[in-house]
Amino acid sequence: MRNKDAGARHHRLIYLLSVAQRRVQRWMAAQPSSEVTPAQAGLLFILGKQNGVLMGEVGAALDMGPAGISGLVDRTAAAKLVERRADHEDGRAWRVWLTPKGRTALAQAKASAAQVNAALTDGFTSAEIDIVARWLTSIQDKFPRQLSTELSGDP
């Protein structure tokens, strides 16, 4: 179902989405109780669900390429929140594990995320939030990480 409502073209959705993302990330990073960056929190959330994940799997889950996830894991390991270990079956692969300090940071990140989610949803019904969540999720399908030549304009 496509939205052909002429009014929909005037919402400046790209601008609004971009500004909203930057403001939420800045606000989260500026919190005094925030021991981790939003990106590090994402890494901790993944490891909280399944510890010892392959770096490539973490990168895919966070929609990051190899260089980006490597840098994120390096910074998070330097903060002693995670550690990287060689995979037992494939010596070329690396797995990422939470440290005890990382588990504490994860608990704090969960509490912070709950506060942010409460602020984001304040004033909206559950049905409205369901629509927003569906719309945001649909963006991942409409604009896949690996652009096809059709979308990128390459021959």
Image (cartoon, rainbow, N blue to C red):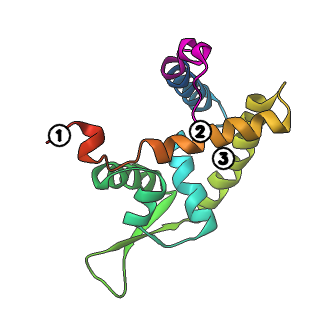
Indicate the secondary structure of the residue bearing disc 3.
helix
- Which residue position is annotated with label 2? 136
The image position of residue 153, as x and y in percent, is 22, 36
Badge 1: few (under 14), some or many (20 or more) residues near its Cα, within 10 Å? few
- Which residue position is annotated with label 1? 154
Q: Nearer the viewer, mark 3 or mark 2?
A: 2
Residue appearing at x 68%, y 35% in the figure: 132
Q: Assign the C terminus to one quadrant of the image.
A: top left
Q: Assign the N terminus to one quadrant of the image.
A: top right
The image position of residue 29, as x and y in percent, is 56, 31
Label total for image: 3
Give the magenta range.
1-15
In the image shown, does 20 or 102 lie closer to the viewer?
A: 20
Magenta highlight on residue 4: yes
- Which residue position is annotated with label 3? 109
- Mark 1 and mark 3 lie on one chain; the one further toward the N terminus is 3
> What is the CA distance from the residue labelled 1 to the residue labelled 3?
41 Å
In the image shown, does 92 or 138 lie closer to the viewer?
A: 138
92 in relation to 73, above or below = below
> What is the CA distance from the residue labelled 3 to the residue labelled 2?
22 Å
The image position of residue 122, as x and y in percent, is 82, 27
Please state if 137 lies on the left or on the right of 71 as rendered: right
